[in-house]
Image (tube, rainbow, N blue to C red):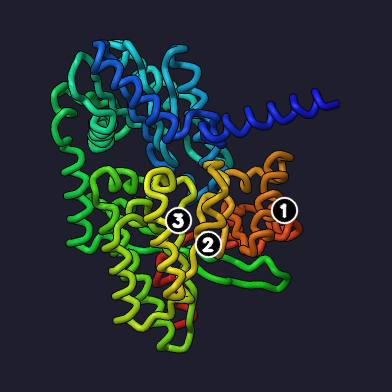
Amino acid sequence: MVRAALERAERTEAELRYLADHDSLTGLLDRRRFRAELDQYVSFAARYGGQGAVMIVDIDGLKAINDSFGHHAGDNLIRQVAATMRERVRATDMVARLSGDEFAILMPQSDTAGALQLGEDLRAQVAESAQAEDGAPGATISVGITMFGGKGDTAAEAVLVAADQAMYRAKEGGRNQIALFRDPEEPRREPPRRQTTAARIRDALTDERLSLHTQPIHSLALGGGIERYELLLRMRSEEGELLPAASFIEAAERSGMIQELDRWVVARALELLAERERVGTPISLHVNLSGASLTDVSVLEFIERRLDEGGADPGRCTFEITETADVYEHDYDTAAGFADRLTDIGCQLAIDDYGAGFGPFHYLKRVPFDLIKIDGSFVRDMPRSDADQLTVQAIVQIARGLGKATIAEYVEDEVTKEMLREYGVDMAQGFHLGRPVELEEAFAATG
């Protein structure tokens, strides 16, 4: 009996280790683990010689499918693309999902011809067979490739940026294409992609091409209605396409522009809160903050100054901070002090994507969070997954024990909503409860 218990404990520990390194939707490596593997291999190649390739793969038009057919259709497409990559790569290659629609492949000991051939195989296979559901159209991918190797000082970050730059060139060329980063020396210098990304975001700020959408967060109490709203950043490209934050936030982080975007969103959020207060129809808003902003004192000072000058009620402003932010590993004390100060001035804090990282629980006690947002990967398939049901129930019990409220994302049907209510989840958001809409449309009815 003792042996059986030990075996169960070992299996549980192994499962948690797996979940900590893998994307829950696709089973691929997650961004943190991929970056660690890339760091190790690039360092090895720089010291001892060797070569390799990194490929960035982005699904074209995923946002349109999510908006028109729901995240379930988009998730199905993501799984198909992930399966195609898993089937086509070599046993020594490493495949990861970096973000919502972006993947990466590390190809050790690959030459340019081999990398280009794999990219073309993936592009052709996805274009031929990838299909969402519910009548949604199929998809194509844009692929960026960069080569690295030989002894030198190439950094893993520069390799990723170069591959990312090539991928965007493929998109700009019309999508469903492959682009190769051709200058082997460029990643060792300041990559142009950093400058290009910063310039694009700065131009969007200057030309007023940033906008906010909002999605309602509903109370799950019987008879409950809209409790609050989450603000979602959008950027309109020069070609007129409305881009979701997921398509440019990671690039903004790499280029050092993320704090400026956070300041822009915070300023608009506090202006909106103050305006609604003045007209007698107050609302509560959720605002996302990046990990980089959590360790930037100037961002904290900006928030305090805007609250003092604008007259917004800080109690109606909740800042969402993702559980998987690297800041928890690298600068925990600064982030905790930032969170303490926000709480002191009356704001609320929410952990976003809770459960996705399976990180340590100690910051739940140390950082004064008020709400826990259950990661959508445990919610969207919950009616069909015993494991997801158990995970959601466990998170609710943790939250209750710590005196915190819970919010579930990606609620796309009534069955899921009722199960969440039964488990004791306090609030929920998702397409079933309300799709993201432009700010003006969301509040037009209430004046």
Which amino acid, mark 2?
Phe
Q: How crowded is the residue under tag 1: few (<14 C-alpha within 10 Å), some, or many (20+)?
A: few
Which residue is rendered at x = 20% and y = 49% of the image?
A: 198
Percent coordinates x, y for residue 184 in the rendering: 16, 21
Residue 73 seen in the figure: no
Res 14 → quadrant: top right
Distance from disc 2 to disc 3, alpha carbons, whole Å, reads 10 Å
**Dots 1 and 2: beta carbons under 8 Å?**
no
Disc marking residue 321: 3
Secondary structure of residue under mark 3: strand
Secondary structure of residue under mark 2: loop
Percent coordinates x, y for residue 280 in the rendering: 47, 88
Q: Earlier in the sequence, mark 1 or mark 2?
A: 2
Q: Is residue 292 above or below residue 138?
A: below
> Dot 1 corresponds to which residue?
415
Q: Name the side, left or right, on which 99 lies relative to 219.
A: left
Which residue is rendered at x = 36% and y = 17% of the image?
A: 107
Percent coordinates x, y for residue 30 in the rendering: 47, 33
Disc marking residue 30: none
Viewer-side residue, 244 vs 308 = 308
